[in-house]
Amino acid sequence: KQEVTQIPAALSVPEGENLVLNCSFTDSAIYNLQWFRQDPGKGLTSLLLIQSSQREQTSGRLNASLDKSSGRSTLYIAASQPGDSATYLCAVRPGFQKLVFGTGTRLLVSP
Amino acid sequence: NAGVMQNPRHLVRRRGQEARLRCSPMKGHSHVYWYRQLPEEGLKFMVYLQKENIIDESGMPKERFSAEFPKEGPSILRIQQVVRGDSAAYFCASSPPGTSEYNEQFFGPGTRLTVL
């Protein structure tokens, strides 16, 4: 059974810091891995999707890496801003169907 | 091109009532997924449907929950005789036809169900 773990559960940093969020999964047989952002009381915004054949994806200040063999992914946020404050969710796709989500990292960036 | 639509956004029910949650997928999408997010927990898969077919309902509670995706109209998640433990955010996602590993799921804003 695929399980996804995210560390840390919560993170508080001052504005401007670079930070890394971690995601690990127990079964390396995945099609892709996706990072989402969720604001309080809101839906999910897809940030980056990494296919199983890829090693990383970049979008603006965000960079996500994937090491499928070790079951790990990291989301790197450069020069953090207060607007980055949200919960970040990692999800893997073990088949054509469902996504399996981690419990998220709650990020607070202080001005 | 409108995204995934869900309604209502907020739903309040008393114990024992029925809750109906609706999801309209993105235009051209024929696959629908429902996920539930309990307070302080991650999203959990419930069911995967294609038009008129339930493909995978391995995450659905065995009783009181049902889902459909008719040929015409939105997908419906139905919860009968709701209990307080059903209070959660219910998210719908859709993806294009086909089973390509590159198909991405796009999420709606969710319906927040509160059971009094």
Image (tube, helix red, strand yellow):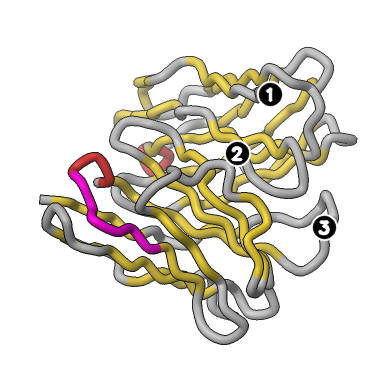
Secondary structure under badge 1? strand
Furthest toward the right, the residue is A53
| Quadrant including the N terminus of chain B | bottom right
Evaluate whether residue B80 shows in this view: yes
Q: Residue at x 56, y 31 (%)?
A: A77
Q: Are marks 3 and 2 on the same chain?
A: no
Nearer the camera: disc 1 or disc 3: 3
Chain holding disc 1? A
> What amino acid does circle 2 point to?
Trp
Residue B27 among those drawn in magenta: no
- Residue B115 as seen in the image, left or right of residue B1: left
Nearer the camera: disc 3 or disc 2: 3
> What distance separates the C-alpha of mark 1 from that of mark 3?
24 Å
The residue that label 3 is drawn on is B99
- Magenta segment: B78-83
Q: Quadrant of residue B58?
A: top right
Q: Residue at x 71, y 44 (%)?
A: A49
Considering depth in this image, is A10 or B102 the residue closer to the camera? B102
Residue B79 among those drawn in magenta: yes
The disc at residue A73 is 1
- Residue B39 as seen in the image, left or right of residue A57: left
Residue A1 locus on image (x, y percent): 66, 23
